[in-house]
Image (cartoon, rainbow, N blue to C red):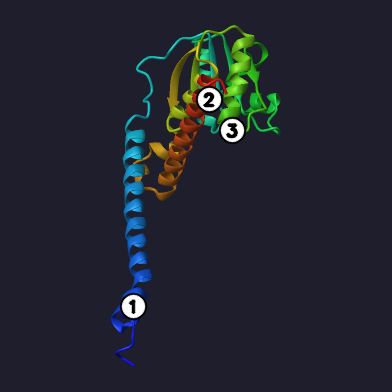
Amino acid sequence: TAAMRRPSDHPEAERRRASLPRRAARRLGRGALKLGLLTAAAFAGGFAAFMATLPAPPAADPVAEGIVVLTGGDDRIDAALRLLGERNADRLLISGLHAATSRAALRRQHPANDSAFDCCIDLGWEARDTPGNATEIARWARANHYRSLIVVTAAYHMPRALLELDAQLGDVTLIPYPVTPDALARDGAWRDPENVRLLAGEYVKYVAAQARIGGDKLLRMAGL
């Protein structure tokens, strides 16, 4: 009977119990939305700062003991070869070449620098990514006892390249020589979705490299 119904069995109490999962779901949804908005804001702020600090070409060509170029576009190799031809350094390493790219093929592609391939250019085929470039370059720099290097790569790639290189060559002076790819140099380049994806992807890789290298330093400091 109604007189014998327990308070917890009252219809209102039952409705409240039934609504608990819905309220919890709404709270969870609001929390997830807030977290998503905060993450997006942090990404946007970090990405804007990353773009604002991308290095510009130096006002005057730098001078160092060696030049290293991280492959990824002919414009990078052209810039490195020009610096070598103008004697801004004694020797050049082209790092991260595809296995199918031969010295003879490079000579044909850059005939104005044909003689330099006989004396002053070393080729690296081992690197498959930026950490691999850093390993290859570090080995080359130590073998040649270089204390200063001009680093040639795309402007958007330069922060990560310098980060990886400094982790392996902290005692070597690294002088950035950024190159702006044609796709990013034309008018309206920043409004092209493909370019935005390229730059956002590079920013993500840069943050990941910071986390990995920073974590490695902490582990070494802790003696682990």
Is the residue marked by circle 3 packed among few (<14), some (14-19), or many (20+) residues within 10 Å? few
Q: Nearer the viewer, mark 3 or mark 2?
A: 2
- Is label 1 in a helix, a strand or a loop? helix
Image spot of residue 100 (x, y percent):
71, 34
Q: Nearer the viewer, residue 213 or 105?
A: 213
Quadrant, the C terminus: top right
Determine whether, in the image, residue 67 is placed left or right of residue 48. Answer: right
> Residue 29 lies in what quarter of the image?
bottom left
Q: Which residue is mark 1?
A: 8
First in sequence: mark 3 or mark 1?
A: 1
- Is label 2 in a helix, a strand or a loop? helix
Q: Nearer the viewer, residue 37 or 116?
A: 37
Residue 180 badge: none
Q: Which residue is mark 3?
A: 129
Asked if residue 111 shows in the view, the reply is no
- Is label 3 in a helix, a strand or a loop? loop
First in sequence: mark 1 or mark 2?
A: 1
**Amino acid on which the number 1 mark rests in the picture:** Ser
Q: CA distance from mark 1 to mark 2?
A: 56 Å
Is the residue marked by circle 2 packed among few (<14), some (14-19), or many (20+) residues within 10 Å? few
Image spot of residue 57 (x, y percent):
38, 23
Asked if residue 151 shows in the view, the reply is yes
Q: Which residue is mark 2?
A: 219
User: Could you tell me which residue is drawn at 31 percent across and 78 percent down?
Assistant: 13
